[in-house]
Amino acid sequence: MSELLYEGKAKKMFTTDDPNVLRVEYKNDATAFNGKKKAVFPGKGKLNNAICTKIFHVLQEKNIPTHFIEKISDTEQLVKAVDIVPIEVVVRNVVAGSLAKRLGLDEGVSLGRTIIEFYYKSDELGDPMINSDHALAMKLATEEELAEIRRQASRVNDVLQTLFADAGILLVDFKLEFGKLKSTGEIVLADEISPDTCRLWDIKTHEKLDKDVFRRNIADLPETYEKLFNRLEAVQ
């Protein structure tokens, strides 16, 4: 019998008859600023599920290991069960958001090289930034696991930059999570990749095609996500 295993800001996760497989349900909720701003948008869960499915299919075609199995309904997908590594990985190609504030850089400036940042997954502490030495000292991952996470994050960035560029979209930055398969211990990409977890701008106009439209009250969130999905679907 299926039981609720976890409920986050944007998804619910349920058990299945197979202990190595979980069912994910995408919610219509949107949050920002660590949950201080909240809203519900009918159709958001369906769009995020569709966008995430498209992206995971592309990554798997490029032999990047992920937890994704298949989409089973408008708002649900099956994934492999993992033990999440308690590190959020942020990949940055263009200055935006907290990086602009932290370093006093102008938003929209190309970094010239990709930056990969680690953050300790802790709601109580506000997900503080850490480096590899912190991660090792706190036993969040081994040196080999950290190296594999960096390698996979860099590979994901390469694939997604091409995918989005083909759709006329600039991949500014994005958040990744990794987990170890409960069945084998292999490190794989987990969680989701969606406009909730990425900054995506039109290459020419820098129109925002992500959750920043909600954060900054710029545009309608479902309309923005549908525009993004349609552009990705047009990419062969």
Image (tube, rainbow, N blue to C red):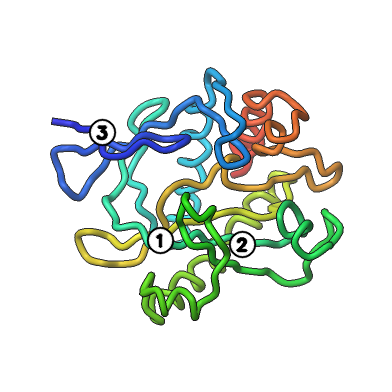
Q: Residue drawn at (73%, 60%), measured in percent from left and top?
A: 99
Q: CA distance from mark 2 to mark 3?
A: 31 Å
Q: Residue furthest front?
A: 124
Amino acid identity at mark 3: Leu
Q: Residues within 10 Å of mark 3 (few under 14, many from 20)?
A: few
Q: Report which residue position mark 3 lands on.
A: 4
In terms of secondary structure, where does tag 1 sit? Answer: strand
Q: Nearer the viewer, residue 179 or 9?
A: 9
Residue 86 is labelled as: 1
Q: CA distance from mark 1 to mark 2?
A: 16 Å
Q: Residues within 10 Å of mark 1 (few under 14, many from 20)?
A: some
Amino acid identity at mark 2: Val
Marks 1 and 3, the one that precedes in the sequence: 3
Q: Residue drawn at (75%, 45%), measured in percent from left and top?
A: 201
Q: Position of residue 85 (x, y in %)?
A: 38, 62
Marks 1 and 2, the one that precedes in the sequence: 1
How many numbered badges does the structure rendering display?
Answer: 3
Name above or below for residue 198 compared with residue 184: above
Q: Position of residue 71 (x, y in %)?
A: 37, 35
Marks 2 and 3, the one that precedes in the sequence: 3
In terms of secondary structure, where does tag 3 sit? Answer: strand
